[in-house]
Every structure is written in C-alpha cells, then in structure tokens.
Image: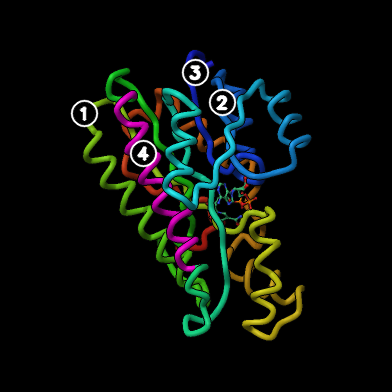
Amino acid sequence: MSLAGRRALVTGSTSGIGLAIARALVAEGAEVVLSGFGGADAIAALCEELGAQHVAADLSRRDGVEALMAGAGPIDVLVNNAGMQFVAPVEEFPVEKWDQIIALNLTAAFDACRLAIPHMKAAGWGRIINTASAHSLTASPYKSAYVAAKHGLAGLTKTLALELATFKITANCISPGYVWTPLVENQIPGTMEARGLTREQVINDVLLQRQPTKQFVQPEDVGAMAAFLCSDAAAQITGANMSMDGGWTAE
Ligand code: NAD
C-alpha cells in the first residue's frame, strides 16, 4: 500500500467527497485525521470504521484552522476539501455568505497549507490536494462567491506547486463537475427560486445540462483520483487541475 506510514488530513470528511477521499486514503494504508461537522454518534462510527481521529473545528474562522492543524499534528497528505455553496444573484447575495464562502473555500486552504508545509519540507515528501470544482475553470450565474473562491483556489494551487517543486511536495486540484452529495442537494431550493424552476428542471436542465455525459460524478471516483495523486506514479504531476466533470469544461 503506497501510503503506509503517511498521515493524512482531509477537511470536510464527515460527508460527501471528503469522506470518499478519506476512505480511499485509508485503503492505501494512510492514517487519517477527519474533520467536519456532524452528530457525535455518526462521527464516532466513522472514526471506528476508518481507524481515524476526528478534530472538530469551524474552518470558516482562522483560529478554527489553527486549532485543527494543532490538533492534527504533523501531516504528510493535506486534502483541503471543506466547502460550502450559496446561490443568489449578485445584488441580492448576502454579504455574510460571501465572507463565509471565501473564508471556508479559499482562506482555510491557504492557512492549512502554510501550517502543514514546514513538516512536509522537513520530511522531504508531501502531497497537497485541493478539492476545487469545474467552477475553478468556468462560471455559472448566481454563484459569485463560490466561483471566485474556486478560481482563487486554483491559483493558490499553481503557486504552491511552483514554490514546492524541488521539495518532493506536489500540489494539485481535483475539479469535479456535479457530484451527488448534500452540497448539491442543498442548492436546489435556491436555484429553483433564483431561476423559477421545479426541482426536476433544476436537476436535468441546470445541473446535468452542464455535463455532456448526463451523469453525476461519484464521490468514490474523486477518492480514487486523490489516492492516485498521492502515489509515486504522480510525483511529476504538480500544479495540475484534474477535471472530473463528464466533459463539462471541454465545451
Ligand atoms: P458536503 O456538504 O457533503 O460536505 C462538506 C463538508 O465540509 C462536510 O464534512 C461539512 O461538515 C464540512 N464543512 C462545512 N462547513 C464547514 C466549516 N465551516 N468548517 C469545517 N467543516 C465544514 O459537500 P461535498 O459535495 O462533499 O463538497 C466537498 C467539496 O467538494 C467542497 O469544497 C465543494 O465545493 C467541492 N465540490 C463539490 C461538488 C459537488 O457537486 N458536490 C462539485 C465540485 C466541487
């Protein structure tokens, strides 16, 4: 197993894509630190399933990220995955939602990286994987904060790749299209309201309309990509933005 002896932190790993990534890294032998919100019983069950530690923190706050990194200890694989979405026209976009999305989807990744990198440099090996999005490469209406944060995350990733290139530390984005997780499910009401559509119209005419394959990406597929990016075969992949979007950004 390629990750035996490596310690991985996956943010936002109590649900959806982050949980699938955590499972994939554990399957490769990594020791995993989970982070994210959820009920105490559900989190305890995940920790038992994965032999993992969970560190609770609100990553939309800088002191939350600092507490997470202190609680997690030295990290060899950092997966910045926690994220949130909010859908509204720019002129109606709640300013507190803008601040929260930029803080969680972008600034938390910067803070986690700056705190994780000294150990990776000392260890002479590291992997940084940022869950970006097709929205790191292209835009959709009503998602101003999310699109801005994900484009920023893609830029941060490229900068990290250049700064870390000679330290055997890679930094890459994985950019899924629509993956059926609570994050997608929860944006349906806002999209229905913003566009005046039914639930079925949002799923078929807005979400899957963007994906030429007309299928949702599976969380497990993203987990497999993360595991590959941690492998020796991926040592020369750095600064890349790995699209997994059913052809969305090929158009
Ligand atoms: P999800 O809602 O299922 O999971 C989000 C995770 O982040 C959960 O573990 C949650 O507890 C955690 N989280 C939320 N707010 C937090 C906070 N303030 N502090 C700490 N943790 C917090 O979402 P998902 O779909 O699995 O999304 C994961 C990542 O993938 C996000 O960055 C998202 O932008 C990205 N993404 C999702 C899709 C998709 O279609 N689902 C597509 C592209 C990119």
Residue of label 4: 113
Residue 33 % position (x, y): 56, 28
How many neighbours does mark 2 have within 10 angstroms: few (below 14), some (14-19), or many (20 or more)?
many
- Earlier in the chain: of badge 2 and badge 3, it is 3
- Magenta-drawn segment: 98-119
How many neighbours does mark 1 have within 10 angstroms: few (below 14), some (14-19), or many (20 or more)?
few
Amino acid at the residue labelled 2: Val
Q: Secondary structure at mark 4?
A: helix
Left or right of 34 in this view: 155: left
Q: Nearer the viewer, mark 3 or mark 4?
A: 4
**Is residue 212 or residue 108 the one in the foreground?**
108
Q: Main secondary structure of the magenta part?
A: helix
Residue drawn at x 43%, y 26% as measured from the top left:
75
Task: Kindly identify which numbered label has been placed on residue 32.
Answer: 2
Residue drawn at x 46%, y 52% as measured from the top left:
132
- Earlier in the chain: of badge 3 and badge 1, it is 3
- Earlier in the chain: of badge 3 and badge 4, it is 3
**Is residue 71 or residue 238 the one in the foreground?**
71
| Residue 181 makes an appearance in the image | yes
| Residue 251 makes an appearance in the image | no
Residue of label 3: 2
How many neighbours does mark 4 have within 10 angstroms: few (below 14), some (14-19), or many (20 or more)?
many
Q: Nearer the viewer, mark 2 or mark 3?
A: 2
Q: Secondary structure at mark 1?
A: helix
Amino acid at the residue labelled 4: Cys
Q: Is residue 156 above or below residue 150?
A: above
Q: Is residue 102 magenta?
A: yes
The CA span between labels 3 and 4 is 22 Å
Left or right of 63 in this view: 84: right
